[in-house]
Amino acid sequence: MDTEFLAKTALFKNVPPEEIQVRIHCLGGVVRSYDKGTYIHYAGDVVHTVSMVLKGRVIIENDDLWGNRNLLGQMGPGELFAEAYACAENEPLLINVLAVEPTTVLMMDLSKVFHTCSRSCPQHQQISDNLLHILARKNLSLARRILHTSSKSIRGRVLSYLSFLAAQQKRKIITVPFNRQQMADYLSVDRSALSNELSKMQKEGLLEYHKESFKLLKEE
């Protein structure tokens, strides 16, 4: 396992690389691989593990009874998923986790994260603290999504989301981490309606775009 890579992740921040493999063993770590298009977790599952993407990418989605899909986010190398449900204990998932490319995942027993071993080593406590920070950031991410989808208009949602990305990426040309369908799902709008609105906004000189690249030209 690439401990140098793991040392750069949020979960193992400030944990010496030479200690990481030991801590993973202590946490009952298991590495699993999934093909593209494979579901790692389904809504209704009960999970007790926190999972980290080592390679590949997963999306977090929710489907209602009518088949409407709601994209909640995506996770790449070094990022975690399902940690909040594992913390809640016996709380069924309301989400699906789908591998959108060949993906390798490290799964660790969450109960062993919060209940330290007999050694009470400082590295174990550091991982616990790191996980709490990750949960806080995830909560902020959900709050941002609520903000982006609070507008009643598609244009308002697009401008809110792209403005956030522009501030985050600090570049004139920004990259949206979704394809057009995923972006529509994230903003909770119809894909065709989103494409039409983007075309209108480009004609009006508000922005320019090509695939996942966008340039904001002026405020509305």
Image: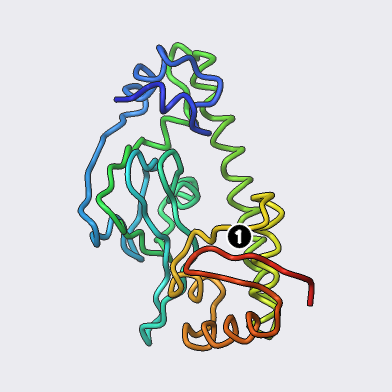
Q: Residue at x 36, y 63 (%)?
A: 96
Residue 37 located left or right of residue 24: left
**Vertically, is 209 above or below 128?**
below
Give the residue number, with chain letter if any, for mark 1. Answer: 142
Local packing at callout 1 (Cα closer than 10 Å; few below 14, some 14-19, many 20+) is: few
Task: Judge by depth and name the residue closer to the eye, 124 or 74.
Answer: 74
| Figure label count | 1
Q: Is residue 44 above or below residue 29?
A: below
Location of residue 98 in the rendering, given as x and y in whole percent from the top left corner: 32, 60
Camera-side residue of 205 and 95: 205
Of helix, strand and loop, which one carries label 1? helix
Q: In screen coordinates, is 133 left or right of 73? A: right
Amino acid under disc 1: Leu
User: Residue drawn at (45%, 44%), measured in percent from left and top?
Assistant: 80
Where residue 206 sits in the image (x, y, percent)?
Answer: 71, 76
Q: Residue at x 29, y 25 (%)?
A: 1
Q: Position of residue 136 (x, y in %)?
A: 63, 45
Does any portion of residue 147 appear in the rendered image?
no
Q: Residue furthest right?
A: 219
x, y percent for residue 187: 56, 74
Which scheme is used to colour this image of the protein?
Answer: rainbow
In this rendering, position of residue 123 left or right of residue 22? right
Query: Residue at point 24% right, 62% down?
Result: 37
Q: Is residue 136 visible?
A: yes
Specify the quadrant that holds the C terminus.
bottom right
